[in-house]
Amino acid sequence: MTNTSGLVGQSVKRIEDERLLIGNGRYVADIDPPGVLHAVFLRSPLAHATITSIDVAAARRAPGVVAVFTGADMEEITHPFPPFAMLPDLYTPLYHCLSTARVRFVGDPVALVLAESRHLAEDALELIDVDYESLDTVASIAEGLSPTAAQIWEKANGNVLYDHVDTFTAEQGQSVDAVFAAADRVITERLTCPRQSNQPMETRGSVVEVDPATGHVTIHNATQSTHMLRWTGAALTGKRSTRSALKVIATNKQRRSAFLKGAKDFVSANGDSLKAQDNNGMRSQIKADKSFLKHANLIGIGLLGQDDYPDVFAQDIGGGFGSKGSIAREDIAVIAAAKELGRSVKWIEDRVENLMDGGQAREEDLTVSIAVDHDGTFRGMKVDLVLDQGAYPGFPVGAALTTRIMKVMFPGSYRWEVFEMRSRIVATNKGKYVAYRGPWANETWARERMIDIVARALKMSPTEIRLKNMIGDEQMPTAMITGPSIDETMSTKKTLERAIQLLDLDQFERDRESARATNHYLGLGIASYHEAAPGPPGYWEFVNPGNDALLAEEAQATVEADGSVVVYTSQMPHGQSHETTYGQIVADELGVAIEDVKLVFGDTRRTPFSLLGTGGSRGGPIGGGALKYASRAVREQIVDAASKLLEADAADIEIVAGNVHVAGVPSRGVSFAELIAQTSGDGFEATKSYRGKGDGGWSVATHACIVDVDLDTGKVTFPRYLVVEDCGPIINPAIVDGQVRGGVAQGIGAVLYERA
Amino acid sequence: MTDTRTVTSSPRLVAEAAAGGSVVDVSFTINGIATSVTVEARRTLSDVIREDCGLTGTHLGCEHGVCGACTVLVDGQPSRSCLMLGVQAQGREITTIEGLAGPDGELHPIQQAMMDAHGFQCAFCSPGFLMSAVALLDENPDPTNAEIREELSGNLCRCTGYQSIVAGVERAVEIIKGQQ
């Protein structure tokens, strides 16, 4: 195949910038349907309290106010959020979009005001009279574990929502305790990570349009996951249709099957994976609270009973870092209110709300024990993880899935005889825990910090002990003790060796000595890791049986009858420059200019179904791979048609700058439009599903950071921050560099400044 | 001085008046175009720009004057439009990101430079950075790296770690020098 554009691998300028840098982006707050009502939430000022009364009469009478909804009003018209991933030993509390009887964190929404302007809605908030009776609060992991603390969820076991142990041994018959007893030393440390917050520059927001004639709902939302929002929005606001469903179900077959088609295809394509789900997850949930069975049934009937389903649109998004992958309680409240009023509603969160409940992350307590011999050989590792999920579980992906990924990734790129991890999740009176930029990444921080501690105890250098225990090429292919395969495609050890080379450790020691003379301390931190991007085959089954279904991604490539190239993805860009990188891939495959590739995203009417949208490092390798192979299939159709038209062998057909011709005679070539007009008259189309090539799937890296602390002032600076990373073939180096630098900056910010 | 008057056209302004709020006429020039709007006295300049003028290139990240995304030029000076009221724009000249490119669509050097340097990712913060950078370059066409960092320290970005944005301003300096 002739690679005619050669764009992949180049730092091509961003397609996105052509509109964003002239102020022509279209973010959710920019959408302003005529007559739209402005939504503002009343939020709890207390961390934990019962609501004894709520009086909204004065607010309803206030000028410009069209409606006020309380929690009780919302319970009439919405279903609670059900558990999405049910895991053995996990209890997921059920909760509605607004709180009615109890508030569980500062910012818990208790009422929704809709008015002609935001000012007027905020004026009316002040007229709402809520009587709270304060309860004791649970503000830390330690309090979350305490059996005497106030209980946040009535049906939970205290405040511990999850308590699960996973044990792995390299060889059958080994026992963790025996290896720990046999090792020369066991070194234990408790490491704690403060709460952080994603804080994208654009807050969350939703504009729900209701067609006054048909009642059709269109949701514009800053979401990473358009299809999930469509489904959840339809499901949880379907309570009215639940009541009148049976008749509608009988008469509504056609529309319903259109809505369900994507999901049906998804289920049939992922049947094996879905069947692998552990039924003990559902048993754990039922044991704590069987009401979810009732709610799930009602949700299902309500969903089937609707005679029309919403469309979801997302255009430009001002960052998310994981937080916009969650379906917000506010999203559901706003959809329900718009449907109820038959009017368009706009909710744009303010920054204070985003700080309270836009998403928080990474608050984890980790007690790590490493069993090690005197010569530095790692024998075993035990981890006791406690994660603070805040009050309400994130939907669909809550904290439990994070612990499952940590469980797989904790051993890192090192050899161990045994590994054991206890995972606990506690509820506290805080904002909700969400995915944040590699949500499992505390496994790297804690393991690598612990390795430094072990090295110091054994009087070894941090690099020596890592090199000694890290899996090298000579041991590959092999598997992590937790299951996923590791092959020669990616080598963490090579990144470490390269980092050591670039660091010049002798020079660092000299710098450290001279810094002391000026009352500065220099320190060196090293972290080596591999991460699933998106993981080797079977990776997600090791994370959680049934989760492989989350991995695959479908894309569609088309050449329309007029010759234009239009490709469709269910990825939802929010800063990662998909339009550019996908444009590079498609342009190379089809032999056209990048300007001639139109990427369609963020439109549930037109994009393939996906449960996840953007997240989990799938955009480049999986979303890009799906588009590559869909485009390649279209190219084959083009070449096939051209070889007939031009009476040439398919192997001799070239496409250069959109000109399809026999090699060597471009002047007799045809454009896509001409080719189509002179052959079938129809365009070309191919849809491909992709879940990786069957090898690799990891990104590997070593980060090394030199820190300078001024002992007189306490000022911290970073004379050097080195990243040696191998993420496989790079589509656009400038974009990858930008992602790496941005990630490092967020990490440094978290370490120095964050205690959310 | 602006005059208050009774407005019956918009449900929003009618309700504002019913709530006892003032509704005022304001006139200003925005991106060279003389503009008059009738708005609530308490309406921020950023809302006037975005909703009454329909220029949504100016963004709101915090509405507290912290993030800088809403920065526009008011009489040539970088100003937080979320901390100004619309009525304070009376008689002034405002420039937003939409006003940077030439009438034929030719990019301002700072726009071209940010594209060259891969300055932004999600770009939600970009209007503020661009307007702050334009104000800097208008005053000092050849700033040092430290001066660029100082001038841009009032703008927050969450994606990039800032290095590419500083590099973008340095690239703009090169472009401007090349044009002279």
Image (cartoon, coloured by chain):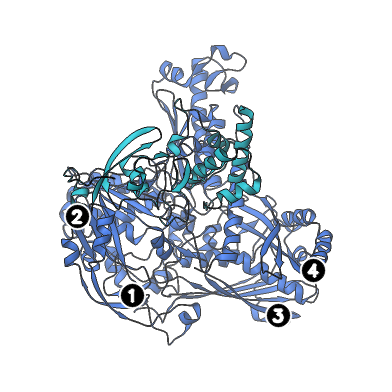
Chain colours: A blue, B cyan
Q: In the structure shown, which secondary structural element does the residue marked by tag 1 occupy?
A: loop
Q: Tell me if mark 1 has few (under 14), some (14-19) or many (20+) residues whose alpha carbon lies within 10 angstroms of its own.
A: some
Q: In the structure shown, which secondary structural element does the residue marked by tag 3 occupy?
A: strand
Identify the residue under disc 2: A64
A168 vs A56, left or right, is right
User: Tag on residue A620?
Assistant: none
- Which amino acid type is marked by label 1? Asp
Q: Judge whether A21 appears above or below A225 on screen.
A: above
Residue at image coords 24%, 60%: A113
Identify the residue under disc 4: A516
Q: Are marks 4 and 1 on the same chain?
A: yes
Using the numbered discs, state the Cα–Cα distance from disc 2 to disc 4 in whole angstroms. 66 Å
- Which amino acid type is marked by label 3? Val
Residue A215 horizontal/vertical position (percent): 20, 47
Identify the residue under disc 1: A289
Using the numbered discs, state the Cα–Cα distance from disc 4 to disc 1 in whole angstroms. 60 Å
Parent chain of label 1: A
Dots 3 and 1: beta carbons under 8 Å?
A: no
Q: In the structure shown, which secondary structural element does the residue marked by tag 4 occupy?
A: helix
Q: Tell me if mark 2 has few (under 14), some (14-19) or many (20+) residues whose alpha carbon lies within 10 angstroms of its own.
A: many
Q: Are marks 2 and 4 on the same chain?
A: yes
Dots 2 and 3: beta carbons under 8 Å?
A: no
Parent chain of label 4: A
| In front: label 3 or label 1 | 3
Residue A742 horizontal/vertical position (percent): 58, 52
Q: Earlier in the sequence, mark 1 or mark 2?
A: 2
User: Tag on residue A186?
Assistant: 3
Q: Quadrant of residue A384?
A: bottom right
Parent chain of label 2: A
